[in-house]
Amino acid sequence: MPPALSLYLDVVRFTAAFGVLLSHMALAPFTDHALWWALGQYGDAAVAVFFVLSGYVIAFVTAERETDGWRYGVGRLSRLMSVALPALVITALCDALGASLRPDFYARPDVGGPAGVGSGYLASLLFINEWQVFGFGAMFPGSNSPWWSLSFEATYYLVGGLFLYFRRNWWFLLALLILMLAGRTVIAMFPLWLLGFHLFSRPPSWPFSARVTTLLFWASLLALIWLPLADRYLPSSKLWFYMPWGRGPYNRDLVSDYLVAASFGLHLLAARRLLQEGAADTWQRWQGGIRWLGSLTFPLYLCHYPLLCLVAALSPFDRASLWHVALLVAVTLSVVAGVAPWSERLKLGLRSGLQRLKPTG
């Protein structure tokens, strides 16, 4: 992957994660009209971007590094667990402290998790909390409702690995069985992940000039900004299908997801064309900062909600004040910045330990 494109994708990843943070902050119970209401519209779009980007990155790593089933399994498991374990610890600590000091705040349905705390943590650690066959009904660990997407992501990793590395017919059938057990919403979102994978592994021919490519780059970016704001004016799949997901559970709007995915797919193609090797020097001066921001992406996404709950519960400021908003952002980013190096060390340690378990012969 060209270095400039890799750096740009780090910018995209962090921007999407920060967009999810802002989308949650814009809604109850965290702030009271202190942020622009439209920020709350961007959370679902950011997750759609994440799924496309995940498939794109997986296509890259399977082509360059994770070239057999063992390496792939080790890489994916270490990536997931290195974020999941710290996030579970942070969630448990934040919820225990917050619920002891502000039980009224944590009794709110948009803060506290569903009944069965232990089972919520166990199902989430196994990444099956969104599998509809079990009928968990929007189960997640404590207050950490954004965990739902990790269940989708882990399922796509598993199914993708079976398709890529195990060629026997019964492995193919096992992959299909896993999708069926995970349920219709996981299946309906799988094409977003596959789109990203296809755009890297088999990119279509690109007949456009540099000028048109630049135009498509900016037009697709504007579409990504506009689509969440125009959501109310677009047709909704919620009128046709019930696709449960996350807290509630909510009903996924596939029309919006697919439009965002298509726009981001076009954006990826244009970015890949523009950010060739020759553009690396332009990005080089910002490399350290961009890589650092990229390292915050997964911890930020998976830790921000319980941190927001705790800080909002204990904040001395009025929820409508900018001081309150600044406190939410500062504490969340500070904790995430402290967790990210720990998460990276854990990933490397897990990867090294799992590699040593590889059977010989």
Image (tube, rainbow, N blue to C red):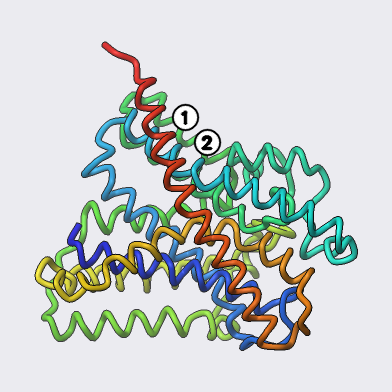
Q: Nearer the viewer, residue 201 or 338?
A: 338
Q: Give percent across and percent down for residue 94.
A: 72, 55
Q: Are marks 2 and 1 in contact (CB under 8 Å)?
A: yes
Q: Residue 263 location, x and y as percent? A: 37, 74
- x, y percent for residue 33: 71, 88
Q: Looking at the figure, which quarter contains the N terminus?
A: bottom left
The residue that label 2 is drawn on is: 178
Residue 162 in sight in this render: no
| Quarter where residue 348 is shown | top left
Type of amino acid under label 1: Leu
Left or right of 315, for residue 145: left
The residue at the point 74 percent across, 75 percent down is 28
The residue tagged with tag 2: helix, strand or loop? helix
Residue type, mark 2 in image? Ile
Residue 288: numbered disc: none
Residue at screen point 35% across, 27% down:
355
Q: Nearer the viewer, residue 340 or 119?
A: 340
Q: Which residue is mark 1?
A: 174
Tell me the residue at 65%/62% (across/down).
305
Secondary structure, mark 1, is helix
Quadrant of the image occupied by residue 224:
bottom left
Quadrant position of residue 252: bottom right
> Does residue 329 sit above or below 193 in this rendering?
below
Q: Residues within 10 Å of mark 1 (few under 14, many from 20)?
A: some
Q: Is residue 59 above or below residue 210?
A: above
How far apart marks 2 and 1 lie (CA) works out to 6 Å
From what the image shows, is residue 228 above or below residue 138? below
